[in-house]
Amino acid sequence: MAKLTKKQKSLAEKLDAEKLYGVNEAIQTLRDLKSAKFDETVEVAMNLGVDPRHADQMVRGMVSLPSGTGKDVRVAVFARGDNAEKALAAGADKVGAEDLMEDMQNGNLDYDRVIATPDMMGVVGRLGKVLGPKGLMPNPKLGTVTPNVEQAIKDAKGGQVEFRVEKLGIIHSGIGKLSFSDDALKANFDAFVDAIVKAKPSGAKGKYVKKITVTSSMGPGLKIDTAEVAGV
């Protein structure tokens, strides 16, 4: 971690590990403790009362963050003909078919989102062992297998993020940068949490949202007072 200033050290020493923060207070505290020279990412982690080993307790989906992510999202698209031209015009970073498949098989996977038209799934299916472990496999339920590649690219580059609960019941995502305004980060926080709440699976028992933590790339994890979070 970068060296803290005297002010930051003083603030860090005063942090109560058990304190519950309001969202805006947590964001301001992360700003006060900022030590990195780069624009840190603000992240939200949620501990959920689910066991994703059971299919009826899986939590997965997409959410569009109203303020964007502040990240340059690289998108690869599997498409041919007119759809390939539309994908390029919409801003895809790479478009192809068998050639793109071979490129990925050779380890070129510097993408944040992979999209495919339905007719290309025969080709994409051969990349299951390559894309699956990285969470990049196109999926119709997530809108990444679609004939409307233009909208899918627009969504990906405009602030749409994918979420998926991990095996310990934790789900997390970046929701913007510390350079964002308080209102922008709060809007993204609300959108993300709301999407997780709405994605509550049928098999979830007991308390669904157990804990919410907000942190930054180089900052501490701050516990959020869930009593102040709408819908939780």
Image (cartoon, helix red, strand yellow):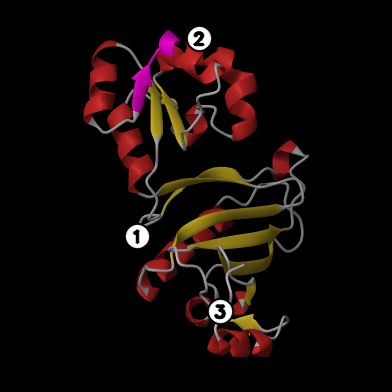
Q: Is residue 86 above or below residue 195?
A: above
Mark 3 → mark 2, Cα distance in angstroms: 47 Å
What is the secondary structure assignment of the residue under circle 3?
A: helix
Which of the two labelled residues, at mark 2 and mark 1, occupies the earlier sequence position?
A: 1
Tag 1 secondary structure: loop
Which is nearer the N-term, disc 3 or disc 2? 2
> Residue at horizontal 36%, vertical 25%?
94
Q: Which residues are magenta?
A: 94-99
In this rendering, is residue 90 above or below 72?
A: above
Left or right of 51 on screen, residue 232: left
Whichever of labels 3 and 1 marks the residue nearer the N terminus, that label is: 1
Crowding near the residue tagged with mark 3, few <14, some 14–19, many ≥20 C-alpha atoms within 10 Å: few
Residue type (three-letter) at the residue carrying disc 3: Glu
Does the segment drawn in magenta span residue 23? no
98 in relation to 200, above or below: above
70 or 24, nearer to the observer: 70
The residue indicated by pointer 1 is 67
Any mark on residue 122, and which?
Answer: 2
Quadrant assignment for the N terminus: bottom right
Percent x, y of residue 158: 33, 47
Q: Is residue 98 magenta?
A: yes
Residue receiving disc 3 = 228
User: Looking at numbered disc 1 in the image, what kind of residue is underneath it?
Assistant: Ser
Q: Quadrant of the C terminus?
A: bottom right
Kind of residue sitting beneath label 2: Gly
Tag 2's secondary structure?
Answer: helix
Location of residue 9 in the rendering, given as x and y in whole percent from the top left corner: 61, 85
Name the one closer to the observer, 5 or 175.
5
Instruction: Residue 55 in the image: state x and y as whole percent.
Output: 72, 37
Residue 60 sits in quarter? top right
Q: Is residue 232 visible?
A: no
Which residue is pictured at 23% across the width and 19% down the height?
Answer: 85
